[in-house]
Amino acid sequence: MENILDKEIKGIIDAYPEVGKILEEYGIGCAPCSVGSCLMKDIVGIHNLDPQQEATLMYRIEKAVYPGRDIPEPKVDLTKKAAPKKIMYSPPVKKLVDEHVLIKRLLALIPSVVEYIENNVEVDKELVLRCVDFIRNYADKYHHMKEEDILFKYVDENAEIIQVMYKDHDTGRNHIRQVVEGAENGNKAQIKEHLFGYRDLLTQHIKKEDEILYPWIDRQLSDTQVGEMFRRCNEADASVGDELPKKYENFINKLEEKFLKEVVK
């Protein structure tokens, strides 16, 4: 089993596809990952499974890789159910989680925005660019920059999970460049494709951060580092002023009011 633990997950899944399916059952989405350089032992550590889950997972993976080997089944107390884990975030990380809420509210509105654009003769360029403004200045510069300039510096930036986050950020920026190009050219199909692409990407991205990445980083931080990060995040927020988050919350409120009224009609 030690040989498996020290191998990159992509190579394991390529050789034994059943391993990818097993990981998916435990909410570990390694199969579709575009990087795949995490070691098997690191994946288990990042996802912080309880001992019973981890023992069963590793048993099933070993059976998939060595089907002919006599592997003792782990002793699992079926009467003892693992208590649902409540994620507790440090104050600076909790602030990032809270910022996700406003971003998710925009993501939820994207289908309505796209439908509105498709149902009108001319592309509502102003509406599209206001959504782009929110994404670029709140989701990216205000939120993602704190991740890239502060949070990620407290761990190994070469770790696969961090590299995946960087790649997601870059992919999201490319989607938004395409949305702007579509708005400038009146190309509804281009706007639709890349707004939905951005929504799908960020939905999974935020889920990975809230449930996996942020708790993983928090587990590695000392009290001193938490305090330092909190100060640095507050300084970053102060540099843009208190009005920026309020401005974009007002924008989302108005957008929801506009489209929720349309749904009610």
Image (cartoon, helix red, strand yellow):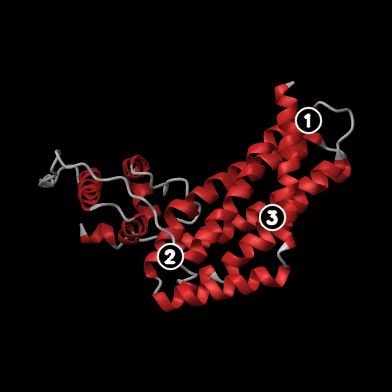
Residue behind mark 3 = 173
Q: Which mark is residue 263?
A: none
* Residue at 60% across, 71% down: 234
x then y, percent, for residue 144? 62, 61
- Category of crowding for the residue at label 2, using alpha-carbon neighbours closer than 10 angstroms: few (below 14), some (14–19), many (at least 20): some
x then y, percent, for residue 176? 73, 50
Q: CA distance from mark 3 to mark 2?
A: 24 Å
Whether residue 113 can be seen here: no
Q: Mark 3 or mark 1, which has the lower sequence index?
A: 1
Q: CA distance from mark 2 to mark 1?
A: 40 Å
Q: Amino acid at mark 3?
A: Arg
Q: Is residue 115 left or right of residue 17?
A: right
Quarter holding the C terminus?
top right
x then y, percent, for residue 4? 26, 57
* Residue at 13% across, 43% down: 77
Q: Mark 2 or mark 1, which has the lower sequence index?
A: 1
Residue behind mark 1 = 116
Q: Nearer the viewer, residue 58 or 135?
A: 135
